[in-house]
Amino acid sequence: MSYSLVQGQQFMALDLRRNQAYWEALKQVITPESVVLDLGAGLGTLGLLAAQLGAKKVYLIEPEDVINVAGEIAKANGYDNVVCLQGKIEEVQLPEAVDVIISVFTGNFLLQEDLLPSLFYARDKYLKPNGVMIPQAAVMEAVPASIPDFYQKNIACWSEIHLGINLSVARSYVSNSIYYSQKELSNAQYLAQPTKLLAMDFHSCNNTNCEIEITQTIIESGCCHGWIGWFAMQLGDKWLSTAPHEPHLHWSAAFLPLDPPLELEAGEEVKFKLQRPAFGDWSWKVKTDTTSQQHSTFFALPMTLKKMKKFSPQYQPSLNDKGKAARYVLSNIDGKLSVEQLTIQLTKDYPQLFKESKKALNFVRNLIAGFS
């Protein structure tokens, strides 16, 4: 669901457990002199909590149009000390440094949405010395798990004959995918103790690459269908966990499947290696004394060789017709031509792309929305 819609913000804005934890952390640091930055504010819930607690000034930063709704909410609640700025933090300019940065820039399994580099940018540019970050730290954890029903529903089902059709070729793609869920993963049986993978102090961390290998001792014999991972974050003097066995939050835990599943015995040691470069693909490798498996979300993508070549640093690209159409529009966003004129010209120059003027109009509007 899109964050650009109010509906897409609902699970975050109304996440009572999360918002209560942030409120408790804010109570520990907000003073009448506090200047606060709510980064990726959405509807502004967390920033408005800071205003409610008496902050001097609150800046809500949000790239989506819902920032306008956040402004309406602030006005409806009588907070005239709340300033709404639309854009990414790298694109806007705050007029002053801040005492507190609030963020929800922790994606599923901490790193999934690649939001942390923007948080670090905001910290380095705007946070005062001895300023406070909420959250201030996070850890990633993972555990081998048996979860047969979930595995059957998402992985094993592809090996069944469907109306006489064998779809098993698809299984190699889905077994290299990561599945994000909370409720369904809460039924998993853990075969070992959850183990910390990675720890981040948001006041000092700059690196979002993940490359870690752990050894876990199996404490419960069973069929291991994969690893379940989650993160916990520190808010003030408390920790908030997104583990599936904890009360529900808007974040989801991650399931990293094995294929085939492994039968593990109590006392057995298993090595689990997790890798992900910033903005890259997840890879996970499992090794026992008798076998090993490796999976990667890169192999979840059904790419042709032609498309795969485009990922190479040595690939020399050239514009296709769609790229040429985009170049025409972008080179003429100079205040001289109207949207209607741009649309008419596109339909004339690229009839193979835009058989209907409405399609050309939407193409122009999307480019204008992103680049003007």
Image (cartoon, rainbow, N blue to C red):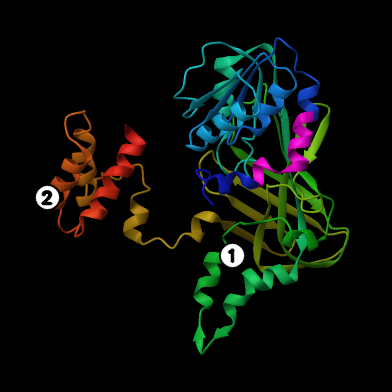
| Residue where numbered disc 1 is placed | 175
Which amino acid lies under the numbered mark 1 shown in the image of this protein?
Ser
Residue 6 rendering spot, x and y as whole percentages: 55, 44
Image quadrant where one finds the C terminus: top left
Residue 270 rendering spot, x and y as whole percentages: 76, 56
Residue depicted at x 73% and y 67% = 262
Residue depicted at x 87% and y 62% = 220
Query: Can you say whether 50 is above or below 188 in the image?
Result: above
Q: Between marks 2 and 1, how big is the CA–CA gap?
A: 44 Å
| Residue where numbered disc 2 is placed | 349
- The local secondary structure at tag 2 comes to helix
Viewer can see residue 318: no
Query: Can you say whether 220 is above or below 313 in the image?
Result: below
Nearer to us in this view, 69 or 309: 69
Where does the magenta region start and end? 11-23
What secondary structure is the magenta-colored segment mainly? Answer: helix
